[in-house]
Amino acid sequence: MMQNQKMASRPSYLPAASLDANALTILERRFLKKDSHGLPCESPEDLFWRVALNIAEADRLYDPQADVLERAAIFYRQMIEKKFLPNTPCLRSAGRNSQQLFACFVLPIEDSLESIFDTLKHAALIHKTGGGTGFSFSKLRSKGAVIKSTDGVSGGPLSFMRIFNAATAEVTQGGVRLGANMGILRVDHPDIEAFITCKADGVSMTNFNLSVSVTDAFMEAFEKNEEYALINPQDGSIAGMRSARDIFDAIARNAWHHGDPGVVFMDRINASESNMVPAIGTIESTNPCGEQPLLPYESCVLGSINLSRFVENKKVCWETLAETVAHAVHFLDNTIDMNRYPLPAIEKMAKGLRRIGLGVMGFADMLIMLDIPYNSEQAVDMAEKIMSFVNDEARKTSERCAEERGAFPWFEKSLFYERGEKPLRNVARTTIAPTGTISTIAGCSGGIEPIFALVHKRKSLWTEKGATAELFVTNTLFEERLRKEGVMSPELMEEVAVTGTVAHSDKVPAELKRIFVTSHEIAPEWHIRVQAAFQRHVNNAVSKTINMPHEATIDDVKNAYLLSYRLGCKGITIYRDGSRSVQVLTAGTGYKPAKAAVSLCPTCPECSAPIEAGEGCFKCLVCGYSKCS
């Protein structure tokens, strides 16, 4: 790595940044270098140049005569023009002391005290440098199982999850946010029922997202209304039998109640492009938001293309999109070489497989610019078309990189090699992440999510006493169209701010109502169909929240799970509007639906979901991201 070399000055011909107030606030508080007084000592342009130059340095590893400044200028323009942004650890740490640039990690947990606490230590190191961690607790013996070495009994996976949860609360992730974890348990583990309900009280496991690893055998038993076997992880013996439909009901009921657990179809993941090296291992877990399945000790760097920058005159600019995909793959591949890894085992896996996760953001904005409603066949078709293009171009670039730099070192252990396919630089190339922070920096909609609210009030200027201001935040495209149609007014903005939508407004033309549809107006089926359309052209997986109205039933949740499985998704997370507010705000007093209250909430910078706010703190209702001023 060459990150310690003196940084060359940014060429004067490179353009300045054009960022809105929200982007500037996020950069100032979380990304810009600070002086000894805690004040920013670099500009946004300095940040983007620092990152671009640092990542471009990797070109010298493959060509000592490489024009690093020219490459850095290309990377800088991609970021400054908001066409492509890498994941937040890269923006924060490239060219700085940490130099830990990856967002996603999975660590193994074997059934021994030594393994459990080694993993806990390794997770703390990763959180310290800004990464999120995923774990499968499926190999741990069940609660009450005998421990021969001590003549004692095991507390089971949940007892150790509580230790991980408490430790995470004490480690600040990258110096700016709490650590994030994914906890996964196989559906055939003897403790699965306790796992499904472990967050039902609303105060336990707050630093974990949970997902049940659902097997094909379980789904077959569900379809046939049969029992399935619980398996002792120690010896593979049968620990008992359960009704598949009863367990499926329990998963759905708890997700309906408070959003956890999600479901991951792990057999499908291992049978797909997510694991093209089964000879090396089996994927057992994902990163905290679920979009990145990884082998034990594997990590991945993510980056996203802003689709809203590739529409002109209601047409997609395919040629410039292809150029950006090529630059983005080059950038992410370079990042693997420039990264400072927290563990030797992680470095070995990262450099052996060279997995990257290129995704998209601004999909909802692109649809609006093309006059396509999110809840339409046209949107599903566009999802297929756009991601197929990005995926194909990413593969072409990876093939070219393999010709110039060599295939990923373990290529001959891969299914690509067995099938006689062209060498690839990267074992996998595409991922759809939530992009909460980087989409705010880019000023676009998050990931492939629809618009959450067209107008909402956001708390701002946080101090130890709480928020000192409340501002209108208006979707830029919505405001532009209102002005163009001549219907923009303060009264309309007030009206839309109450609900976040124009669905029932008589002041907005019908065509705009059709196009500017928001999350809670979109039936879950359309959310899932869009997710499935993207998944068909993504090597890794897709992070997507399936929004449901407060009035949704447990059967609605079950139907969503079944539809996602039948359409080929690799996992699913649902969030029923107001479900977590029931636990926090009205315990024992009943619940009165108040959709306006939800619409007026700020949204999470990590996943764009609603945030609970108060007393100088906020917490995301979906991904668990939290911050106190």
Image (cartoon, rainbow, N blue to C red):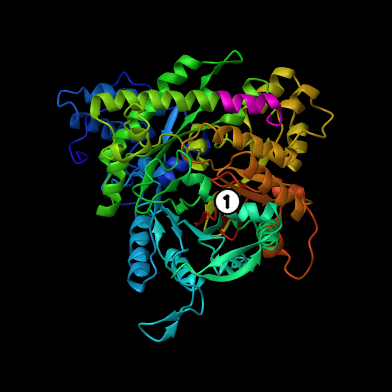
Please state the extent of the stretch shown in magenta in the rendering.
374-385
Using the image, determine if residue 112 lies above or below residue 479.
below
The crowd level at tag 1 (other Cα within 10 Å; few <14, some 14-19, many 20+) is few
- Name the residue at the bottom extreme: 151
| Residue 103 spot, x, y in % from top left | 40, 46
Give whichever of 137, 57 is nearer the camera: 137
| Residue 110 spot, x, y in % from top left | 38, 65
Secondary structure mostly seen in the magenta stretch? helix
Residue 45 sits in quarter? top left
In the image, taking residue 19 as reference, residue 497 lies left or right, namely right
Using the image, determine if residue 55 lies above or below residue 386.
below
| Residue 263 visible from this viewpoint | no
| Residue 406 spot, x, y in % from top left | 24, 30
| Residue 449 spot, x, y in % from top left | 60, 37
Residue 255 sits in quarter? bottom right
In the image, taking residue 386 as reference, residue 357 lies left or right, namely left
Residue at which label 1 appears: 216
Q: For residue 381: magenta? A: yes
Per the image, label 1 sits on a secondary structure element best described as helix
Q: For residue 250: magenta? A: no
| Residue 244 visible from this viewpoint | yes
- Name the residue at the top extreme: 313
Give whichever of 330, 618 is nearer the camera: 330
Number of numbered tags placed on the structure image? 1
In the rendered view of the protein, which quadrant contains the N terminus?
top left
In the image, taking residue 621 as reference, residue 73 lies left or right, namely left
Q: Residue at x 79, y 51 (%)?
A: 551
In the image, taking residue 196 as reference, residue 143 lies left or right, namely left
Q: Residue at x 65, y 59 (%)?
A: 251
Residue type at the position of mark 1: Asp
- Name the residue at the right extreme: 506
Q: Residue at x 55, y 31 (%)?
A: 362
